[in-house]
Image (spheres, helix red, strand yellow):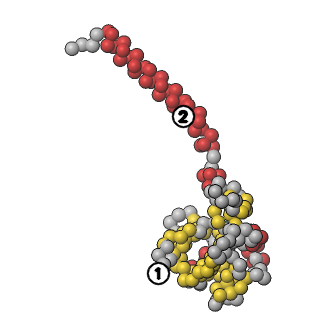
Amino acid sequence: MRPNSKDVDEFCGSNSKQLLTNLLMSLVYNWVMVPVKNFRFRDAMKEVPTCVSIILTSSMGSVSGCTISSLVSVDVNEESPKILFVLQKLSRVGALIKESTPFSVNVLADQMKELAEHYSSDRQSYAEKSMPSFLTKLGVVPIIFGAPINFICRLDQVVSNYSSDVYVSHVLEFSYLDSSSPLVYQNREFRRIGERL
Ligand SMILES: Cc1cc2nc3c(=O)[nH]c(=O)nc-3n(C[C@H](O)[C@H](O)[C@H](O)COP(=O)(O)O)c2cc1C
């Protein structure tokens, strides 16, 4: 059966309405989404609040450290807990702990901002990063005395097929303070935790 002219009109009418709606929606979508395209991924990531930690290791009598914000637990099993963190490919501390040196990861308190800055300074001035006086040692592993959490770790494996390396580490020992106020990093600023909700 051939469609009559009324059917054709109705069909074209509803189709063109649909086309118009699609066109309008795509215009609105592009108008809303264009600014998002202008943002960089790292600008989005800077909004993510993180804790601030320092990795410390000792090699040939000198202590090396690096500030990180990438600490998370990867296995909370009490028998063999594991953490992970991410380091840039050229990391000096990363190179040291790859040599199977034990190391510590110290979660900082909010009054330890200067320490975080000290261990995140330019790679060129690395040799000048001396050990601050409030470091102490647990066996051969340097730790930050007074930090809310100290993890003593040994490297398990490095996942290196990304632009930064992922370090998965065994936690050999740890200590923590029950009530502490950790240092937070967000929007490229150091902050302290606000009021409880
Ligand atoms: C708050 C903060 C967090 C940081 N987090 C990381 C991190 O997770 N991974 C990293 O490779 N560098 C991080 N950095 C940069 C390093 O601390 C800095 O580049 C340091 O000099 C690297 O030392 P290294 O060569 O021993 O790795 C961070 C810096 C700051 C201020």
Instruction: Give the residue type at disc 2.
Output: Tyr
Q: Depth-wise, is mark 1 or mark 2 nearer the camera?
A: 1
Residue 102 visible from this viewpoint: yes
> Residue 62, percent across and down?
71, 85
Q: Which corner quadrant holds the N terminus?
A: top left
Q: Residue furthest left?
A: 1
Q: Nearer the viewer, residue 138 or 154?
A: 138
What residue is pinned by disc 1? Answer: 79
Give the quadrant of residue 89.
Answer: bottom right
The residue at 59%/68% (across/down) is: 71
In the image, taking residue 183 as reference, residue 168 lies left or right, namely: left
Q: CA distance from mark 1 to mark 2?
A: 51 Å
> Can you give x and y, in whole percent of width and height, for residue 59 in the image?
66, 85
Amino acid at dot 1: Glu
What residue is shown at x 66% (from left), y 60% (from top)?
Answer: 196
In this rendered view, identify the residue nearer to me: 40 or 176.
176
Q: Residue at x 61, y 80 (%)?
A: 175
Q: Is residue 138 above or below residue 53?
A: below
Numbered marks: total: 2
